[in-house]
């Protein structure tokens, strides 16, 4: 199973590097296969074609969340962890994912009749958010008047809304800086108020 995930991960990473470097339209399946060091058979085992890779950005994000959670320290509060994740992922998007590619991903999720990867609750993203928010509720930092799932949903909607706005504005502001300035304000609404 690990070898299969490694192959798929290499294909996804190579594809998104090429999409960023040469543009989506100019990237070929053969270039992706060559850069990932895989075979045509492996590529087509996981993906129907280049278009299928658009929805794979969520895998790239989840790999990053897996790495970032190792940076957490025991004394980090839940809000600090969420702010950290938001900043690092938005920085990665700003530096490695073109506005056009992100816009394509978001638009495919609007019109697809198949699986919507961004909403898949089994993703690392949702599992990690749920764990952080539950920890924040158990420590008394975050409100318990809403369920963890309700807060997770609101947080995910907030992040998608910021990414969507960045896309429709053509990336004319820093996604990372704007996200960092807004995420703390957003999370203030979920802090447990002193009684």
Image (tube, rainbow, N blue to C red):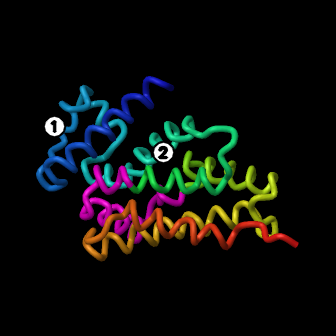
Q: Which mark is residue 47?
A: none
Say which element carries label 1.
helix
Magenta: main secondary structure equals helix
**Within the magenta stretch, is there residue 127?**
no
Q: Percent from the top left, x then y, of residue 57? A: 38, 51
Question: Percent position (x, y) of residue 146?
Answer: 77, 69
**Foreground: 85 or 51?**
85
The residue at the point 46 percent across, 55 percent down is 87
Q: Position of residue 20 (x, y in %)?
A: 21, 50
Looking at the rendering, the stretch of residues picked out in magenta corresponds to 91-119
Left/right placement of residue 156 relative to residue 165 reads right
How far apart marks 2 and 1 lie (CA) works out to 25 Å
Label placed on residue 62: 2
**Along the viewing direction, whichever of 48 and 2 lies nearer the viewer:** 2
How far across and down, in percent of the image, does residue 192 sit?
A: 78, 67
Please tell me whether residue 71 is drawn above or below residue 49 in the rendered image: above
Is residue 117 one of those drawn in magenta?
yes
Q: Nearer the viewer, mark 2 or mark 1?
A: 2
Q: Earlier in the sequence, mark 2 or mark 1?
A: 1
Q: Quadrant of the C terminus?
A: bottom right
- In which image quadrant can residue 142 be found? bottom right
Which residue, given by chain and number where applicable, does mark 1 sit on? 30
In the drawing, does residue 82 fall left or right of residue 37? right
Mark 1 neighbour density, 10 Å: few (under 14) some (14–19) many (20 or more) = few
């Amino acid at each position: 199973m690990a070898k299969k995930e490694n192959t798929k991960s290499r294909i996804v990473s190579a594809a998104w590097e090429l999409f960023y470097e040469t543009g989506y339209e100019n990237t070929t399946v053969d270039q992706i296969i060559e850069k990932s060091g895989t075979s045509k058979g492996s590529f087509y085992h996981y993906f129907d074609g280049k278009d299928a890779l658009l929805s794979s950005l969520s895998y790239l994000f989840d790999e990053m969340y897996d790495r970032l959670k190792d940076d957490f320290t025991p004394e980090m509060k839940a809000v600090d962890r969420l702010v950290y994740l938001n900043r690092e992922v938005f920085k990665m998007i700003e530096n490695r994912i073109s506005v056009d590619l992100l816009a394509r991903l978001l638009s495919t999720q609007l019109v697809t009749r198949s699986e919507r990867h961004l909403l898949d609750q089994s993703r690392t993203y949702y599992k990690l958010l749920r764990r952080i928010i539950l920890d924040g509720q158990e420590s008394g930092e975050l409100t318990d008047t809403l369920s963890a799932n309700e807060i997770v949903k609101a947080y995910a909607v907030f992040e998608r809304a910021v990414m969507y706005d960045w896309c429709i504005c053509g990336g004319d502001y820093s996604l990372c800086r704007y996200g960092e300035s807004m995420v703390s304000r957003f999370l203030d609404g979920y802090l447990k108020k002193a009684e």
